[in-house]
Amino acid sequence: KVWERGPARLPPRPIPFERRPLVRPKGKRGWETIVPGDHKRLPAGILGLLCKAHFPGMVPLRDGGEEPALTWAHYKRVPNVPDEDERDFRTVADRVVGELWDFFRVEPEYRDRAVRWAYDACPKLVTDMHHEARVHAVRSYYAKFLGTKIDKKQARTIWPSEEEYGKVIPWWCAAHKPCWDYFVARWCNPEWQKQHEACRERRLKMPGPAHHQGNRSLDDYAASWSQAHDGRECPPLMAWALAHKGKASSSTVDYNPEDGPEAYSNPTVHTRLRRYTEMAREKHGPEWNPSTEDLDGEIIMRLGGGKKHGRYWIGDSTLDTASTPTLSEIRARSSSSTPPIRPRPSAAQLQFEQSQTQLREEMEAKLQEQEKRHRAEMQRQQEEMQREMQERDARMQAEMQRQMQLMLRQWHNNGMCDT
């Protein structure tokens, strides 16, 4: 029998208020644990489980039809009913965020910001929940019925039948079979499969994984790296670079400003680090070490042409929107002596630039190799000439000695004859 990791569950409730972890919003989307509590779970993980626990299933439409709750907007449209404690939330979305505080507590001055953080995190959590549903179903079917353990990469290329999907309904959808049937019908649709494969092929063309943080914030990754590396400091830019190298727990993952593109999971990371370092030293001086300083939001805005699709070019989850100037503010105070605002290069442009850099490095390496071979050939020829000259000199000396000996013998013979 193949061992399967069971589904994650919420910590047992109720948790006494004073024993709940005290958390605080940090950065753009992260959380910081101020005081530990009865569990070590992360707010994002609890929110994801609450999204599953309160999955609305099929949502009625105004025209009388219905559709599955595929987005966070569906959660907002479904009215809620009082829970076991008679708490009345307006919608299922409000209940998901409201029940988060059954597991955590937050300081009053951070309460509004924490609630906003939670609401902002849920849309992606719902999307991820549905994105992973098919892969999880495939892996569960192979483990339970075929006795074979497969990884996610393999599962994404396997297409079970509708009957096989029906045997592995996830716990959060068990009470909503019509909804699961809808998902299965879509997954078995040849057009959907074709589109899925096209997207997968496009993703495979990317140079490497996005990062190695998992579901942790960059701050959490930095803390884990420091813990695994004897308490060494891990400033924001260094953490961002390391997160694109490998896992925080790996002893081989370390920061070296001399590392080339091949050291990172995605070579475009090297380009961004190089450009950030160049502009940071242009602004702060040649001795400024960006890997030990806080991220400069203005530089990131200038390099990335502002925010694109709501994201910063570097350290998106770490930069604080409130303290980072907008592009309009940067333009208003720019002068001829300040670094320019550059348009953000596309992934294709970065890959082209990286290819050009790699080609240039390869050409330089070839030229160096040719120069090395040329010097070696010149050295060989010089040594050959010296050897030939030495041999010629040796022959000449031997010939001169032979002639001298011959002359001496003749002289000696002539002298004997005269006597």
Image: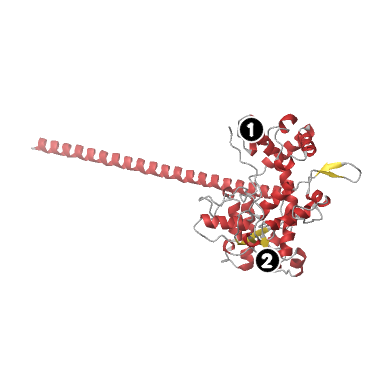
Check the picture and name the quadrant holding the C terminus: top left
The three-letter code of the residue at mark 1 reads Lys
Check the picture and name the quadrant holding the N terminus: top right
The one nearer the camera, 19 or 194, is: 19
* Residue drawn 77% across the image and 69% down it: 332
* Residue drawn 61% across the image and 38% down it: 4
Where residue 110 appears, as percent x and y from the top left, is: 70, 65
Quick one: label 1, few (<14), some, or many (20+) residues within 10 Å? Answer: some
The three-letter code of the residue at mark 2 reads Glu
The one nearer the camera, 344 or 51, is: 51
Reading the image, the residue beneath label 2 is 107
Where residue 168 appears, as percent x and y from the top left, is: 70, 35
Reading the image, the residue beneath label 1 is 144
Where residue 38 appears, as percent x and y from the top left, is: 60, 56
> Is 10 above or below relative to 236?
above
Quick one: label 2, few (<14), some, or many (20+) residues within 10 Å? Answer: few
In what element is the residue under mark 2? loop
Q: Residue furthest right?
A: 63
> Is 282 above or below relative to 91?
below
The one nearer the camera, 405 or 261, is: 261
Q: Residue furthest left?
A: 419
- For residue 172, what is the image quadrant? top right
Where residue 286 appears, as percent x and y from the top left, is: 58, 66
In what element is the residue under mark 1? helix
